[in-house]
Amino acid sequence: MTTTDGKAADGRAEDGTATGGTATVRVDLGARSYDILIGPGLIARAGRLIADRLPGRPLLVLTDATVAGHHLRPLLDGLAAAGAAVAEPLVVPAGEATKEMGRLSEVMDGLLARGIERRSVLVALGGGVVGDLGGFAAAIALRGIDFVQVPTTLLAQVDSSVGGKTGVNSRHGKNLIGAFHQPRLVLADTAALDTLPRRELLAGYAEVVKYGMIDRPDFFDWLEAHGPAVLDGDAAARAHAIRVSCEAKAAIVAADETESGLRELLNLGHSFGHALEAEAGYGSALLHGEAVAIGMVMAFDLSVRMGLCPAADARRLRDHLAAAGLPVTAAPLRAALPGGDWSPARLLAHMAKDKKVKDGRLTFILARGIGRAFRCRDVAQADVAAVLAESLAG
């Protein structure tokens, strides 16, 4: 259930946007349930919010160099004001390249050097890279310590900070090394989004759109009307988009925590997107959300090719993403990074290493229309190759 300042969250404006305050979305996992708090000023209030739920616990903070410049001092000041015992923060380089085994080893050494104990709590302050890396470090340190997610990007607030997927990348593929380890609390400070470059906001917006595509067509209708407000900084619109996204993910995670079935729907666009990220070298040339945007378009195009989805719905998705400023084909990426192979065969080889492969076959998330995503393992490779070729050609 969602609440706003402790009251039922149905007191919103007629367009569905939140009227203000802090909203709470509960991830219902029995004894491991936790809250996602959504609202402005949560970084500064993190000390009291953590102390209320995890009193008297020693804390460690992991962040990256970019986020530290914006948010580390307010976080540390709030933790100190709450009387928390905080070790020297761990600061890693920003960027997807940080999410790898060598950096994980450095983080583990740093945690152990700071004298962590089983009661210690790791606070992951940053985007998806810091959250995934910190969550995995927490999962394996002393065979598991608690951690708190403080996501500072739109993508992390609506996706990677929720649901307990943690891990790092390998040269064999994205997120192939990791563990399910749920946070004890998620603090999504909506004011932190004001520090993001437009490109980072857009990358997160792709994940917001994904929830409408999976099973919330009314949400996609709302995004078609209010998406520009979300991207342009309207506080109420942003809070509403984040809340609905978190509600959507929380419901799926509660039903299928370890991705044995239903949770696979959250991978809409990701099989294609991860292949693009792998060929791009996990660098700044392609952000994860940009890859997901292209991947969702390809998933809908594949659904149309297979006679499953109306072409008009695929056009709606493509037009909305393009109007927002997101890439919808792989052609510009291919042109910007000519050193890669960028052939359908090469991308298919990357897809064959995806963690969703079962018995040698990849599970695709396809759609019968907007808000009607489903899992499918009966997909002809020729159809996938054709869709890849079309996207590469632009």
Image (spheres, rainbow, N blue to C red):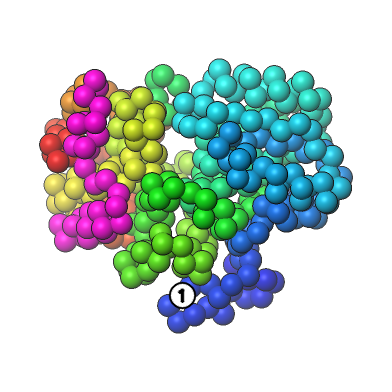
What residue is drawn where x is 39% and y is 20%?
172
Q: Where is residue 14 in the image (x, y as percent from the top left)?
A: 45, 82
Q: In which quarter of the image is residue 278?
A: top left
Query: What is the quadrant of the C terminus in the image?
Result: top left
Residue 310 visible to the viewer = no
What residue is drawn where x is 15% and y is 47%?
306
Amino acid at dot 1: Gly
Q: Does the magenta stretch include residue 317?
A: yes
Q: Position of residue 106 (x, y in %)?
A: 63, 20
The residue pinned by badge 1 equals 16
Pick the residue in front: 9 or 282: 282
What residue is drawn where x is 57% and y is 22%?
103
Q: Considering only vertical position in the picture, is 287 above or below 14?
A: above
Secondary element under disc 1, as helix, strand or loop, is loop
Pick the residue in front: 274 or 224: 224
Pick the residue in front: 320 or 231: 231
Spot the residue most to the bottom: 14
Spot the residue most to the front: 69
In the rendered structure, which segment of residues is drawn in magenta?
A: 311-340
